[in-house]
Image (cartoon, grey):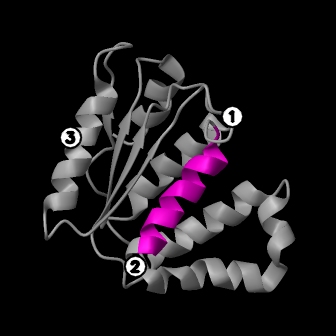
């Protein structure tokens, strides 16, 4: 199904130690308290924790919170799991599998307006290019999904996200 393009991805590009995470926490709190805000999923990257400083962890976290809020979306995870089993989620192809699950969720006709937030893209994320590519692609296709991402002014991030404008 073709959908028209939405507003460009938001990008908070403050320098280091300028309160980007606190600003996003405030936004998240406001969105959570709004009764008509739809779904909200967020992920905070952290360079010092190797279990969460990669694109796969970001995607896994976003999917988890979406499914937790709308359990019917679990069908997209289940479909992939039933086709390949648990080893898929531990293989080198996990990014591909999670990307397909995530795309299926975004294409789901029952998905209400959704806000996806990723904090600290500049935290030495393994697979950053894959993640940025997915954000750019999804923000240009899915009109019911809004993105907010934060990062320091890194040219590679700016260049990739500028493709959304």
Upstream in sequence: badge 3 or badge 2:
3
The image shows residue 156 at horizontal and vertical percentages of 54, 23
Answer whether residue 12 is visible to the viewer in this image: no
- Residue drawn at point x = 26 percent, y = 49 percent: 28
| Left or right: 28, with 33 as reference point | right
Residue at mark 1: 50
Upstream in sequence: badge 1 or badge 2:
1
- Residue drawn at point x = 67 percent, y = 41 percent: 51
The image shows residue 116 at horizontal and vertical percentages of 37, 54
| Element marked by disc 1 | loop
Q: Are marks 1 and 3 in contact (CB under 8 Å)?
A: no
Above or below, 14 against 165 in this view is above
| Element marked by disc 3 | helix
Above or below, 49 against 145 in this view is above
Mark 3 residue crowding within 10 angstroms, few (<14) / some (14–19) / many (20+): few
Q: Nearer the viewer, residue 78 or 160?
A: 78
Mark 2 residue crowding within 10 angstroms, few (<14) / some (14–19) / many (20+): some
Q: Quadrant of the C terminus?
A: top left
| Element marked by disc 2 | loop
The image shows residue 73 at horizontal and vertical percentages of 49, 80
- For residue 123, what is the image quadrant? top right
Residue 26's disc number: 3
Above or below, 16 against 96 in this view is above
- Residue drawn at point x = 21 percent, y = 50 percent: 29
State the extent of the magenta-drawn residues as a range.
54-68
Answer whether residue 78 is visible to the viewer in this image: yes
Residue at mark 2: 70
| Left or right: 120, with 54 as reference point | left
| Left or right: 72, with 24 as reference point | right
- For residue 119, what is the image quadrant? top left
């Amino acid at each position: 199904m073709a959908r028209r393009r939405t507003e460009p991805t938001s990008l908070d590009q403050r320098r280091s130690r300028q309160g980007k995470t606190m600003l996003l926490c405030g936004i998240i709190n406001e969105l959570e308290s709004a009764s008509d805000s739809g779904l909200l999923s967020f992920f905070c990257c952290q360079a010092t924790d190797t279990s969460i400083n990669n694109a796969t962890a970001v995607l896994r976290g976003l999917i988890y919170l979406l499914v937790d809020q709308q359990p019917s979306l679990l069908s997209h995870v289940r479909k992939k799991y039933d086709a390949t089993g648990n080893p898929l989620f531990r293989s080198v192809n996990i990014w591909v599998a999670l990307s397909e699950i995530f795309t299926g969720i975004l294409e789901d006709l029952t998905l209400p307006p959704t806000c996806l937030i990723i904090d600290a893209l500049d935290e030495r994320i393994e697979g950053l290019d894959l993640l940025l590519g997915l954000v750019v692609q999804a923000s240009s296709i899915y009109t019911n999904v809004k993105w907010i991402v934060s990062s320091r002014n890194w040219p590679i991030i700016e260049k990739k996200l500028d493709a959304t404008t």
